[in-house]
Amino acid sequence: MESWMPFAAAAAIAISALATGWAQAKIGASAAAALAEKPELRTTAVLMIAIPETMVVLGFVVAVLMLLKGT
């Protein structure tokens, strides 16, 4: 069963990266539309785009923990 651990770790990163890309695509389009009408929302838009990045970081942490526990 140990041989599946690298695949599971790769899946943890890949799925979280795909989810982040999808979320940022939706948020980026909405943020661009909002900034066209209200430029003062710039800080909020940057924060909303940065928040999904934590999903990739957490996916990486899960992958590292899986690999370290598997050895």
Image (cartoon, helix red, strand yellow):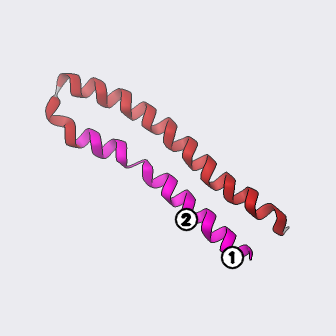
Badge 2 or badge 1: first in the primary sequence: 2
31, 10: nearer the viewer: 10
Horizontally, residue 8 falls left or right of residue 18, namely right
- Density class for disc 2 (Cα within 10 Å; few <14, some 14-19, many ≥20) is some
Amino acid marked by disc 1: Lys
Magenta segment, principal secondary structure?
helix
- Which residues make up the magenta segment? 44-71
At x 43%, y 47%, the residue is 52
Horizontal side of 9 relative to 59 (left or right) equals right
User: How far, Cα to Cα, is label 2 from label 1?
Assistant: 12 Å
Q: Residue 50 carries which label?
A: none
Which quadrant does the N terminus fall into? bottom right
Q: In this view, does 50 lie to the left or right of 8?
A: left
The secondary element bearing badge 2 is classed as: helix
Q: Residue 61 carries which label?
A: 2
Q: Name the residue under label 1.
A: 69
17 vs 69: above or below: above
Q: Residue at x 72, y 58 (%)?
A: 8
Crowdedness near tag 1: few (<14), some (14–19) or many (≥20) residues, C-alpha within 10 Å:
few
Q: Residue at position x 37%, y 32% from top?
A: 28
Residue pictured at 22% horizontal, 22% vertical? 36
Q: Closer to the camera, 71 or 19?
A: 71
Which of the 4 image quarters holds residue 40? top left
Pick the residue in front: 23 or 56.
Answer: 56
Q: Is 45 left or right of 68, judged from the image as shown?
A: left
Q: Which amino acid lies under the numbered mark 2 shown in the image of this protein? A: Val
The image position of residue 30, as x and y in percent, is 34, 28
In the image, is residue 16 above or below residue 27?
A: below
Q: Quadrant of the C terminus?
A: bottom right
Give the percent coordinates (x, y) of residue 33: 29, 23
* 64 within the magenta span: yes
Image marks 2 and 1: residues in contact by CB distance under 8 Å: no
